[in-house]
Image (spheres, helix red, strand yellow):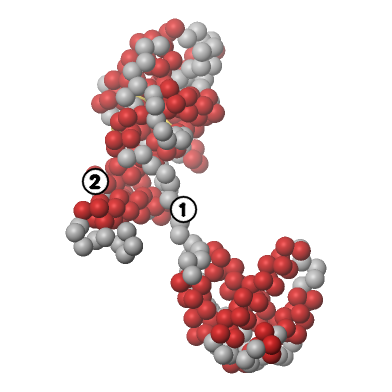
């Protein structure tokens, strides 16, 4: 047992000494990950480094996955083992690196947070009477109706909004212009805001801005973020809401209803459809949740 516990200790020490110029945290991480791998080898009764092959590396990665480790953690562990074997090949301890060509599982893409339709309706039910409430509601309705980025909303000018055509022209990333429709409810909120906008005194270039601060300046992205946070608190939303969440919700709800990924891509102004495809995962997640809650044989074990 003692012999197994100390297996490959010299080979590990020699490698760690060879990377002494790296940062302390890197050295500690590599040493820990290599020792974890060696413990796995002893459990598999592999006592010679030349016995390690690509299949065993794959089995090791699979065992890490079964432990519930993230793709990022597994990739880091395998990377440390790969670097170790690279050194072992260089020093003649082994003939070849068994980790070459091994693909580790990718980390799951972090999905954006969205509000469901009921949550969105709850957030937008606010009917405050002040000019600030009318302005804010117009901004939230436009964000959700047209899927705008907060920076795009802040840069909208009066001339960009065509009430008769029910559309707004925005400048997105890469200075790309796109025209997107404005929904009926958003159109009504914007019309109300336009009717009271004259209460905000403006001058010079600021006069062109669609949405104004109390002192007549163009609303900034930061202004909009703070106002939405305040709005959610005022009208009783229990969500930590930010402007981009309304854009995410727009995309998710559009895809749930239409299934038209290309159309959603165009509306969002994504240059690459792979960026839009994250919402297909959200859509599937929604369907999976409905299935789990509804199908009599869909209950997961332990639930």
* Residue 270 horizontal/vertical position (percent): 41, 46
Q: Which image quarter: residue 299?
A: bottom left
Q: Which image quarter: residue 300?
A: bottom left
Q: Which residue is mark 2?
A: 258
Question: Quick check: 101 above or below 300?
Answer: below
* Residue 4 horizontal/vertical position (percent): 65, 88
Label of residue 110 in the image:
1
Q: For mark 1, does the 10 Å Cα neighbourhood hold few (<14), some (14 to 19), or many (20 or more) residues?
A: few
Q: In what element is the residue under mark 2?
A: helix
* Residue 184 horizontal/vertical position (percent): 25, 26
On the rendered image, what quadrant is the C terminus found in?
A: bottom left
Q: Is residue 201 left or right of residue 281?
A: right
Marks 2 and 1: CB-CB under 8 Å? Answer: no
Q: Is residue 97 visible?
A: yes
On the rendered image, what quadrant is the N terminus found in?
A: bottom right
Q: In what element is the residue under mark 1?
A: loop
Q: Residue furthest left?
A: 296
Question: Quick check: 174 above or below 300?
Answer: above
Question: Quick check: 75 above or below 176?
Answer: below
Residue depicted at 49% across the width and 32% down the height = 151
In-front residue for pair 118/303: 303
Residue depicted at 55% across the width and 69% down the height = 75
Q: Is residue 168 visible?
A: no
């Amino acid at each position: 047992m003692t012999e197994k516990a100390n297996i490959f200790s010299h080979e590990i020490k020699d490698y760690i000494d060879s990377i002494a110029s790296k940062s302390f945290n890197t050295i500690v991480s590599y040493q820990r990950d290599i020792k974890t791998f060696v413990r796995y080898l002893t459990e598999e009764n592999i006592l010679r480094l030349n016995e390690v092959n690509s299949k065993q590396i794959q089995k090791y990665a699979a065992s890490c996955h079964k432990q519930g480790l993230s793709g990022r953690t597994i990739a880091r562990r395998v990377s440390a083992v790969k670097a170790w074997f690279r050194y072992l090949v260089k020093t003649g301890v082994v003939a070849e690196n068994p980790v070459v060509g091994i693909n580790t599982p990718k980390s799951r893409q972090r999905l954006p947070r969205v509000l469901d339709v009921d949550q969105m309706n709850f957030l937008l039910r606010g009917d405050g009477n002040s000019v600030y409430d009318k302005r804010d509601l117009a901004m939230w309705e436009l964000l959700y109706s047209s899927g705008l980025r907060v920076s795009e909303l802040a840069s909208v000018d009066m001339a960009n909004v065509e009430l008769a055509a029910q559309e707004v022209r925005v400048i997105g990333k890469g200075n790309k212009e796109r025209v997107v429709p404005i929904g009926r409810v958003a159109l009504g909120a914007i019309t109300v805001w336009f009717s009271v906008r004259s209460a905000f005194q403006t001058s010079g270039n600021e006069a062109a801005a669609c949405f104004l601060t109390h002192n007549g300046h163009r609303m900034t992205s930061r202004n909009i973020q703070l106002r939405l946070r305040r709005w959610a608190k005022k009208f009783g939303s229990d969500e930590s809401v930010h402007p981009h969440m309304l854009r995410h919700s727009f995309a998710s709800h559009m895809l749930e209803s239409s299934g038209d990924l290309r159309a959603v891509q165009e509306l969002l102004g994504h240059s690459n459809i792979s960026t839009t495809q994250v919402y297909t995962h959200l859509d599937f997640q929604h369907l999976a949740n409905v299935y789990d809650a509804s199908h009599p044989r869909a209950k997961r074990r332990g639930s």
